[in-house]
Image (tube, coloured by chain):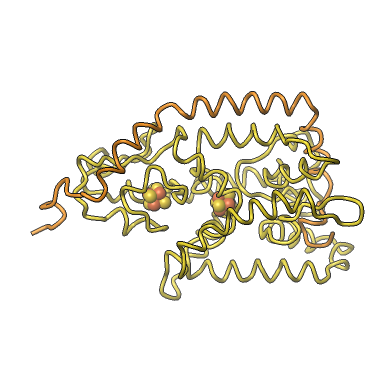
Chain colours: A orange, B yellow
Amino acid sequence: MDKGRQGRGSGMHTEAVGRGREKRGGHGWIFGLLAGAVFFGIGAARGELSAIWQKAVMICMECIGIG
Amino acid sequence: MRRIRTIVQIIFTIFTNGYTYGYLHGKIYQGKLKYACVPGLNCYSCPGAVASCPLGALQALLNRRGFQVPFAMLGFFFVFGSIFGRFICGWLCPFGLVQDLLHKIPVLRKRKRLPFHHILKYGKYVVLVCLVGMGSLFLFGGFAKVPAFCKYLCPSGTLFGALPLMASNEALRGQAGGLFFWKLGILLILLLLSVKVYRPFCQYLCPLGAIYGWFNRFSLVQVRWERERCTSCKACQRACPVDLAPEEISRSPECIRCGKCAAVCPEGCVHFSPFPLQSGRKHI
Ligand code: SF4
Ligand code: SF4
């Protein structure tokens, strides 16, 4: 007899966790995405992308364990 | 599913590290694509890298004079994290791929976790706060702040940056000293450990995993578990490389969205959402 099948829906310890929490996740990602776009825009306007580029196009001595 | 994931990982790694001229001449790419970051841990001093590393970029911004909020990287993490969460770790990170491949080597009895996992798993948050955050803000080398995570820990920098660069650049080889051998030691320990334990760097040390893990709870890409149809057979937990119980799957910061649980669930109650990459046996 397959024990797992016998106990269909018997994940008792899981019940409180499962449903409530999963539903709450809903559309949070949209707010995260919008916040990210705003942050990114502010950073770009402040010239941060250039700062990143300047660091990225030189060999980073710390990264390779020399600096 | 496993094969699809490995293929995606390999293609993405080649695609984002495809600057062959760099490998041949011991140089790095200096074009405009480096204004952008790749999502996973990928040293920008890798001779093949065509874009920037998000952790390197974050530290570069923190290393500026005074304290300035690194808005661009906050934005980057919110955008990528909100869409993908740790799907990035499972599918799009070159250093994750390296550890996955090493773990496939059929020697030693495999372990999913290290002993004291419940404590050690917080190591990545410690690294994020102490090395990436405070280290980059307060550690000084001469008069300049240093990117402390890159300098003292990052194994991607050693593997994808230092080793190929030094292989083709004699001047750099001559400068290797104590710090290089420290980082080389860390890399070797992690690589050897990966053969036995599943992704030790990702589970215990990677600050990027810590960041993306926070987004797992509400990211667009999810692996969902349907409690109503679950028979508690635990097939998903046995298949899960990081040993997550079914009720932990959806929200756990440890889940790398590899999809192995979805592939084995006999009831089809674990599945990717919103993209039906593989929705369990009953949904195929
Ligand atoms: S935890 Fe870090 S190294 Fe591991 S896959 Fe995620 S970003 Fe890459
Ligand atoms: S819970 Fe599923 S998707 Fe997440 S790591 Fe485990 S097997 Fe992979």
Residue A45 image-quadrant placement: top right
Q: Is residue B11 above or below residue A40?
A: below
Instruction: Pick out the residue farthest to the bottom.
Output: B108
Q: Quadrant of the rendered structure where residue B24 is?
A: bottom right
Does the image show residue B1?
Answer: no
Q: Is residue B144 visible?
A: yes
Which residue: 58% across, 55% down? B124
Q: Name the spot of residue B246 as percent of width and height, x first.
A: 31, 49
x%, y% of residue B34? 75, 38
Q: Which residue does the image show at 71% across and 40% down from the upper left? A: B51
B131 or B255: nearer the eye? Answer: B131
Q: Residue furthest left?
A: A1
Count of numbered marks = 0
Q: Is residue B193 above or below residue B268?
A: below
Instruction: Report which quarter residue B79 is drawn in.
Output: top right
Q: Check the image and report above or below for A65 versus B73.
A: below
Front-lying residue, B269 or B114 = B114
Residue at 27% of width from left, 43% of height from top? A16
Residue A67 horizontal side relative to residue B218, left or right: right
Question: x, y percentage for residue B76?
Answer: 64, 34
Q: Is residue B233 left or right of residue B144?
A: left
Quarter of the picture holding the C terminus of chain B: top left
Which residue occupies 54% across, 70% down? Answer: B193
Q: Position of residue B43 (x, y in %)?
A: 70, 51
